[in-house]
Image (cartoon, rainbow, N blue to C red):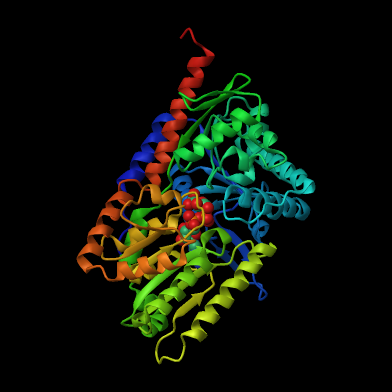
Amino acid sequence: MTQARVPLSQKRMEALVRERFAGRRLVVVSNREPVVHQRGANGKLKVQQPAGGLTTAMLPIVQACRGVWIAHGSGNADFDVTDARDGLEWPPENPSFRLRRVRLPPDVEAGYYNGLANEGIWPLCHLAYTAPLFRHSDWVMYREANRIFSEAVLEEIGDEPAVVFSHDYHLGLLQRMLRNRRPDLLMAQFWHIPWPNREVMGVMPWMAELLHGMLGNDLMGFHVQQHCNNFLDTVDRGIESLVDYENHRAIRGRKSTYVRPFPISIDVHAYQQTAAEKPFEKVFPELAARTHGQVMLLGVDRLDYTKGIPHRLRAFESLLEQYPEWRGKATFVQIGAPSRTTIPRYAALADEVQALVRQINSRFGGQERWTAVHYLPEHHDREMLAALYRRADVCMVTSLHDGMNLVAKEYIAAHAGTPGTLVLSKFTGAARELLEACLVNPYDIEATAALIVETLRMSPQQRADAMRRLYERVCAHDVYDWATDVLTGLDEVSRRQEAQAFPGN
Ligand code: ADQ
């Protein structure tokens, strides 16, 4: 096996942390933990790395900085392996960061995570036409969960100076709670999902409290400028504050919160290397035999209604219907990591996808050695995903609305400039950067089918050229560049805050 190479961007990020944040502890806070300990029915302990953009993005950073990651301990054996302060050093053979697990009582977890975060804020922020549910009892639990998280952060950092980098819509109140107790902390938060306009956000009954919580940060990051503008506008109209549009900041009391776009990315080298090392035929021998010689279209997602999975399956069905020459020649592989399975809307989606796959396969069945859709609704590790990405002729990302979408970037990284086509929803943050992708409106099923056929008819040279340009774009800004940008932003903001506190200096 090739020795893993440390990318230059990672070295730059580590140097920045050493130069600018020396003497401050780096604390990452998120709901989801990067590793989960589960004990199966046979009593055996298993370690899982959950799917999701946040883990993919933050793990290399917290490792590089030797920081502490504070997250909800959601595994059934999580607290079997922790120390007296509910933490552990990870990975055990060569520790590079501390994982502090937060205990949430079941009723708090249900109201905060399934309830307010995933049945309320998630659909609210995604314009995917699933109505948000707001229950007062969930809001009470959301506040309580944020309080429990804040206690864990304060305990971990003690009296030390620290940088707290928190994540996402689960933790909207944490920063104000920390700010009230430790005004000296340097705090940034990254909001991984879209922030729609103020009319949409105004539906949430506790929007003012949420905004007040988020303005405890020194820096608020979103993927794209439009989400920053929407956020500032929501603050401007939603709570008593001063919004300085020229400097992109909101001022509440004497505190400024700067708002900036930081388009997230992936560990490009890691994906590229894994894809190059593990050929598809070795990783998926059976699937490789069954799809040999066929054009492969691929979808990789958490099973979430915002990702437009039924839309893309219908587009493939329409393709087989309208362009019969592709029957027997094109096959669709859909990978779907089960997600939020106890929420009824997610269970309904899982059923809908299963039924659609069955419908398409029975409608276009009957051909020897060809299955129209291969559906693998399981978690897959990076080796497996990288091998699939490399094999796939077309990757379909058809989100109805998405902050960024990392799958699009992973596909490009794994292909490393070899021919391939990315079909990308214009409603993703990624569409603003990945200009050579084939942009689609996923709601327009027939047009999506026609566009896929058009891309399949492109020459290998055209497909390779487009892919090479996309690859250059993704390489030019990887996840370490993203982290460097956020940390540089935070450093600049801290200097501005100091200058404002001591204007005579
Ligand atoms: P997600 O919606 O979770 O998060 P997305 O960008 O779609 O993130 O990335 C999903 C991640 O999960 C990818 O890294 C992918 O490889 C992985 N994954 C998907 N299916 C999998 C499977 N079956 N097995 C294993 N892994 C799987 C949010 C926002 C996004 C934003 C990210 C990062 O909704 O818009 O891009 O955060 O900020």
Nearest to the observer: residue 88 or residue 304? 304
In percent of width and height, residue 22 lies at 45, 31
**Quadrant where the image shows the N terminus:** bottom left
Residue drawn 31% across the image and 59% down it: 3
Q: Is residue 104 above or below residue 257?
A: below
Image-based side of 221 in relation to 470, left or right: right
- The residue that appears at 29% across and 55% down in the rendered structure is 471
Give the residue displayed 50% in from the left and 85% down from the top: 363
Instruction: Establish if 142 lies above or below 176.
Output: below
Q: Position of residue 324 (x, y in %)?
A: 37, 82
Q: Is residue 312 visible?
A: yes
Q: Is residue 304 above or below residue 13?
A: below
Which of 454 and 160 lies nearest the eye of the viewer? 454
- Please tell me in which quadrant of the rendered image residue 484 appears: top left
Residue 22 appears in view: no
The image position of residue 441, as x and y in percent, is 44, 58
x, y percent for residue 228: 50, 36
Which sits in the foreground, 2 or 141?
Answer: 141
